[in-house]
Amino acid sequence: METKLLPLDVDSLSQGAALIRRGELVAFPTETVYGLGGNALDEAAVARIFAVKGRPADNPLIVHIWEHKQAEQYCHWSEQAQQLADAFWPGPLTLLLPRKPIIPLIVTAGLDTLALRLPSHEGARRFLQACSLPIAAPSANASGRPSPTTAQHVQTDLEGRIPLILDGGPAQVGLESTVLDITCPHPMVLRPGAVTPEQVAMVVGSCDVAPSVMRPLQPGETTLSPGMRHRHYAPKAQLSLVEGDREAVAAYICRMVDQQPGARILAMGVNVPLYAGRQVDDLGADTHQAAQRLFYLLRQYDDENVQRVWCEALPPTGLGLAVMNRLARAAQFDIRHAGV
Ligand code: TXA
Ligand code: MG
């Protein structure tokens, strides 16, 4: 199959919508990462999403809508959902709510809950509206690769497997949406993203964070988010994180890198001078830039066949929690402490 990559405009949007209505898949930009969309009401289209990505069938998909009032068609809405939607939609927040039967079970991997999201990306919303259907869309990467933050990333992973990629430029956030379970007594973040637990708590009073966000699952432990069972964000390189005092971290990483020719360093911009004379990649000036750049840099390491990466840990607060969640998984939880 030929894969077209077209800039998102009136023409490509109508081509995309026509493909979706025929049961085909289309990759489209969102503010978080690129999505691989298909008609959520069409079991065959959804089955194709799993097949194209090589995604395990027990990992449910997010359904995307373009206006608030659609939500009640697909799930049992609540007052708390309304408060959160008023505060954060459109935007990078996915809400878990009780599923209505109109959504086929293949979408939710057999679960009674549905993950629903209203993205803020203008092009995404125009695409969804042009389709006039609820769109099931996981991140548009091949399973096990970092989520795509550019149309070129999607092309690398899915070329020949889908008919169309809509190019809306680089993703603004760069990390996937926050997944928030509001079917339990206290809202709980299952996957951290740009809408932070702190912000959620300001709206609904409290917000828990699932323990599996920052540590591996223990043997026999179950998780509320099937996505946590699978190993995501797996770079080719062996990655280690180092936490601690700024100078101690830099000294530790320098010691390691000096024994491992070819090893790379991922560091915040202000710390780059601490690694003088070594190969260091700049995560940016703040956590927002780090979020934007992370998947891009991890893919670059794959392309360059980098074997070893040492990365500074970030404080796991605000958006830093989302960055650290992805980094910790990419590092298979190899997090070291640089002593004084
Ligand atoms: O930002 C995003 O969320 C992007 C864009 C395209 O919207 N989508 C995305 O989808 O990241 P995906 O499929 O890569 O990640 C969805 C996550 C998975 O970890 C999945 O396990 C979880 O959401 N999820 C979906 N439905 C769920 C459900 N009913 N219960 C628990 N977790 C669910
Ligand atoms: Mg994904």
Image (tube, rainbow, N blue to C red):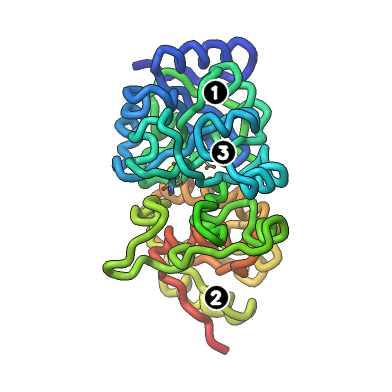
What's the CA distance linking mark 3 and mark 1?
19 Å
Q: Earlier in the sequence, mark 3 or mark 1?
A: 3
**Residue density around tag 1, few if under 14, some if 14–19, many if 20 or more, within 10 Å:** many
Q: Residue at x 39, y 51 (%)?
A: 227
Tell me the kind of residue under disc 1.
Leu
Q: Residue at x 64, y 77 (%)?
A: 246
Quadrant of the snapshot with the C terminus = bottom right
Asked if residue 303 can be seen in this view, the reply is: no
In this image, 302 relative to 279: left or right? left
What's the CA distance linking mark 1 and mark 2?
39 Å
Give yes or no for contact between labels 1 and 2 (Cβ–Cβ under 8 Å).
Answer: no
Q: As rendered, which of 289 and 55 lies closer to the eye?
A: 55
Percent position (x, y) of residue 323? 56, 58
Residue projecting furthest to the bottom: 340
In this image, 221 relative to 322: left or right? left
Asked if residue 317 can be seen in this view, the reply is: yes
Residue projecting furthest to the left: 220
Tell me the kind of residue under disc 3.
Arg
Give yes or no for contact between labels 3 and 1 (Cβ–Cβ under 8 Å).
Answer: no
What's the CA distance linking mark 3 and mark 2?
33 Å
Q: Earlier in the sequence, mark 3 or mark 2?
A: 3
State whether label 3 is within 8 Å of ligand 1.
yes
